[in-house]
Amino acid sequence: MIRMLTVASASLLLLAACQQPPAATPDKAAPAATETAAVAGPGDMAPAFTLVDAEGVQRSLADFKGKTVVLEWTNEGCPFVKKHYTGAMQALQREATADGVVWLTIISSAPGTQGFVEGEEARAWKAKHQAAFTHLLLDPTGEVGKRYDAKTTPDMRIIDPEGRLIFIGGIDDRPTNKVEDLEGANNFVRTALADAKAGRPVQTAFAQPYGCAIKYPETVES
Amino acid sequence: MRLLVALLVWLTFAASASAAPSALDQALKAGAAPVAAGPQRTERIEAELVPMSAWATPGSTAIVAVRQKIKPGWHTYWRNQGDSGGPTTLSWSLPDGVVPGDILWPLPERQRLQSLMNYGYSDVVFLPVPLQVPASVQPGQTLSLRVTAHFYVCSDEMCVPEDLDLSLSLPVRDGAAPLDPRHGQAIQVAVASAPRPAGIEARAAFADGRLTLSASGGPLADAAPKWAYFFPFEGGVIDHAAAQTGQRGPQGLTLTLAPGRGLTANGLKPPLSGVLSTDLGAWEISAEQGAALGEVSGEGVIGDGEAAQTPASSTTPLAFLQAALFALLGGLILNLMPCVFPILAMKAAALSRSAHEPAEARRDGLAFLAGVLATFLVLAGALLALRAGGQALGWGFQLQSPGVVAALALLMLAVALNLSGVFHVGGGLQGAGQGPLSRLPGAAGAFFTGILAVVVAAPCTAPFMAFALGAALLMPWPMALVVFLMLGLGLALPYVLISLSPRLLSRLPRPGPWMETLRNLLAFPMYGAALWLAWVYGRQTADALALLFGAGLMLALALWLYGRSQAAPGKGRLAAVAALLFLLAALGLGVLAARAAPASTDGAASSAHLPSQPWSEQAVQTALAEGRPVLVNFTADWCVTCKINEGAALSSARTAEAMQAANAVYLVGDWTRRDDSITAELQRHGRSGVPLYLLYAPGRAKPRVLPQLLTEGTVVDALKDAAS
């Protein structure tokens, strides 16, 4: 009797086992994992671009050939950016431009998203933040940001006079929004500019970027 | 006679109540003890510092957790946040000597944000942190724990850093602490499921713009994951947003990863550490630089499971329906389980008596259903309430108390004597149809049978129940109660259907003298049940079996005298008084028996015929370290399914041979009496009751769970597999 019951229950158990796994849906066909190799890395030529600045003037990277160019992605609403704009970023901009470096601050936020500015607000941006960059460039389509694979704010690039990328990534080694972390942080942009000025190879050519996601419009193809 | 029934019922409940106070008491104390400073809130996140256990023990590790409740649409982050955001950081200020460990990060979700990939959490998440409590703290003291939690709380639109000051007063006491009633269970789950190293070997190679990560051994050997994804601890090593493609092989898997900018700029800096997540589990791995390992590809392509990623473990309606359905089936099957069989006998007897009076049959059927459902409600309610109070209890917990077992044994004896014709309840067979009053015991009796069926059936965790009850205990309580009720419905369903269908009823034979014979025959399973319970009781207690036997004898004598007084109404008075006296004696002995000290020795269940050792986590690890497979049997004497498995599959010569051939260690975890460590272990495997059979193989982190109904073949094959 017991054996019969055992057999009966076991077969039911088997049936149950057949139904039980909620079968994780098979993955969507995964695209090849290596496409990103196309994005320029340290040592590669910086992609060309033309953007309109806050004053409405067209600025091309080619205009600054022969000079060291710093690209800075920003978003005034981002807490990580705010940390640097307590004075440190402005000071670095002042130092760099005094050395003849062209500093281009880029806003890639799409219209309606955090950080987006236009018109009068864009013109007032520099004074409002007491910034010392050369130009504020507006990239509302996010095209240039994506061409440089900029992911966060702040995200930095340094381009040498020949047009090669010599630094890519996060501005320093303290990925926080805390102002007290500016003290003692290793500012990779400052050291890279110093290396470039002294004709040395840049020590840290890449640093993991950190901060807020850039508010790209979803419509722009990556 | 109704007085007698009432007394017996009272005895059952009194005994169970006398067993419960200490548990309830503890639960109440546990609830009152830690004075939490409560949750702190901002617009986007609510956070609270909560303990896993009700108190901290000097010289041990206490686990506390930062509980986050995150507003829908917002996220906080893992240790590597991915492309944006930032990890949650904790700054502690703790009493002298208390040292915080690292956060035990739960497996993060992949949060794709356009072209970015973030690793983080949403909804409710616990970040458990182990705290070393020095031996110098004194019981009675209270540890004042403070932490400033810094969260990056981000939505698709913006990121907001939030600092919240959290505090918790954790009492210090000696002895093992029960789980904290509020979040203890959830924290325990978070701790148990946090990815950790599992003996997986891994290699990373970076060539031709591809990062190849291969992993083998441990839980990956002989596993066939459907997908795999690697979460690196460091940012910049891989392109977080790129899809990961993989191959699986007999010993493990290979992943091809798009390199991150850090990797292309700075090269590979081994070890490459992170969490390897698959549909079978997630483990911490650390890959040295080197060529791919052997046998980690060639058995097919696997994806990275992004589509299969499920949101954090909330109960989905589907899971609930599934659990309810399995509960119903489980209840139906319960009717076939050996421990319910005696009750089935009672039901059959009752049914054959009323088979040809449809109205009466219907009433009995519904009363039986009501009895079953009411008891399930009470038991499940008590179980859920006690668990919410931090008690580590599982289904069948009532049979872990010797008092309840003794009472049930006496009750079974009384029922058996009744079936033997020694005495009658409410006029019984002869009295049927004498008037409306005498019918009452019929319905009451059916109701009572329903109660009895559930109480005795509960420990027989049928295969379907294991899944349903394990799931139910983790659900919100209204859902859990529904699952339990479905179980009851399943148990009562066959009987109710028959009693409601005149067609089926009419097929039952006409009443006649044969019914008395049937009743007398069916008494024997009940005697058997009484003996079984007495045996369980004897194993639970030190030396009190004699008391129970004495109580049984007195009860039998009292019932016989009572029966005599029923048969001869004239001389009834004297016999009734004597019956009452003997009944009181039986009750006295019964209460003594119920209070008997539990047995102190904790030897391995001798009923298992293989040479065995008592189970402990330690014993498992020791044997695995020696390279021996380990078969663990979680059993209890009151679990008939366990006993059948032990008698059939675990004690055969072939099994013994296979054990020897595999050089396996056999460990028995005996749950006959309450044992919190076993309860916790059962829970880790999603079970709330015995039997549970685990087979550990050296070099594999996770044991294999064997079916609940074992066959010799299953065990032998599994052992061969584990040894190979």
Image (tube, rainbow, N blue to C red):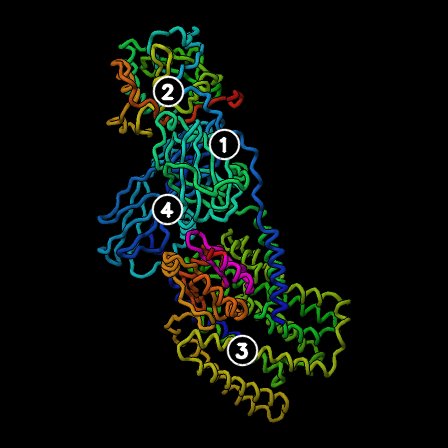
Q: Is residue A127 above or below residue B523?
A: above
Q: Amino acid at mark 1?
A: Ala
Give the foreground label among 2 and 4: 2
* Numbered label attached to residue B149: none
Residue B128: mark: 4
Marks 3/1 same chain:
yes
Instruction: Name the residue that disc number 3 marks.
Output: B530
Residue flagged by tag 3: what amino acid is it? Answer: Ala
- Which residue type does callout 2 highlight? Pro
Tell me the CA gap for discs 2 and 4: 40 Å
Q: Residue A187's image quarter?
A: top left
Q: Chain of mark 4?
A: B
Residue A14 location in percent, x, y?
Answer: 61, 57
Badge 1 is on which residue? B243
Q: According to the image, label 2 marks what residue?
A: A42
SS at circle 4: strand
Q: Secondary structure at mark 3?
A: helix
Residue B532, position as x, y percentages in the image: 52, 76
Q: Is residue B474 magenta?
A: no
Secondary structure, mark 2, is loop
